[in-house]
Amino acid sequence: METLVIVSMFISGFLHAYWNFLLKSAEQPNLFIALSKILEASLLLLPFVYFQQHYPLSLNQLYLVVIAALLVFFSYYCLALAYLHLDMSIAYPVSRSSTLFLPLFAWFFLNEQLDAIGFSALMLITTGVVLLSFTGARSLSNHAAKLSIKGIVLALAVALISALQTIWSKIAIAQVHPFIYFYSYTLLVAIGYAVLVLVKYKAHAIRQQLTQHWPAMSLVAVLNTASYGLFLYALSKANTAYVGSLRQLSLVFALLLGYWLLKEALSSLKLLGTFIVIAGTVLVTLAG
């Protein structure tokens, strides 16, 4: 695998983990992510106008963007809900476990094959994700257990949607310029969130969130753009399942952020899971 692809995914993983840390730190994650997506669409409007003049999106390509927007919207919505029920050190690994689904999807939709090394690497990463995901629940009470189960289901839904989104992105960027594709569905998601915010939240709550958290929201917008841009680059250069597995590097960064900044528990099983994920990501760089 090309060195530049590996470096791109390493940086992408860190950026993705950090903006998720900012989201987890918000007291109203659904409103926070909604406003950050609106800011993201606003900040990228001028670059979009430039790229649209040189790489225009045609009407017969619009369905690529609409489907992507739906996948992204439901992914963010489920992720924000998962963070209400689980610690970041549990919710984030589960939501990033798209390796559970990607190899099958890549084979079925893209006819991509894995070699023995690649398959072994994905098995290692999946094992590490499982260890990271199901250890260190915040409480043993029945109420907390129910909430944790609900959170895990929501986070698994994010993983499934992310796998589908990865496959769809691979298909889309073969037909549409990556930035045009990314911004177009981001704009649709932002419009959807704008409607949701106006319907669900009162004006003073929106103003309060913007006043208190607009720097963090703007940073999330920038980090998400950079992270996904690097991911799309890697996706255009390498096997889909391998690129998806390299995204799991973000789990290591998320674990450290959760431990150092959110004071979340760090068990021996989580450390073991981290080392297994690292071993798997190293191995996948050797896959053909």
Image (cartoon, rainbow, N blue to C red):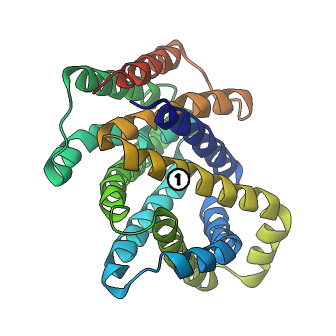
Residue projecting furthest to the front: 54
Q: Quadrant of residue 124?
A: top left
**x then y, percent, for residue 235:** 39, 47
Using the image, determine if residue 27 lies above or below residue 270. Answer: below
Can residue 65 be seen?
A: yes
Q: Quadrant of residue 43?
A: bottom right
Q: Which one is nearer the viewer's eye here, 241 or 86?
A: 241
| Residue found 53% across the figure and 42% down from its top | 86
Can residue 101 be seen?
A: no
Using the image, determine if residue 181 lies above or below residue 121. Answer: below
Left or right: 170 as drawn, with respect to 35: left
Q: Which quarter of the rendering shows the N terminus?
A: top left
Q: Which one is nearer the viewer's eye here, 116 or 187?
A: 116
Q: Amino acid at mark 1?
A: Tyr
Using the image, determine if residue 234 lies above or below residue 173. Answer: above
Using the image, determine if residue 110 lies above or below residue 87. Answer: below
**x then y, percent, for residue 116:** 20, 21
The crowd level at tag 1 (other Cα within 10 Å; few <14, some 14-19, many 20+) is some
| Residue found 34% across the figure and 35% down from its top | 242
Residue identifier under label 1: 228
Left or right: 219 as drawn, with respect to 234: right
Left or right: 24 as drawn, with respect to 99: right
Q: Which one is nearer the viewer's eye here, 24 or 84?
A: 24
**x then y, percent, for residue 278:** 47, 20
**x then y, percent, for residue 221:** 66, 60
| Residue found 16% across the figure and 45% down from its top | 107
| Residue found 44% across the figure and 59% down from its top | 75
Left or right: 214 as drawn, with respect to 70: right
Q: Which one is nearer the viewer's eye here, 135 or 287?
A: 287
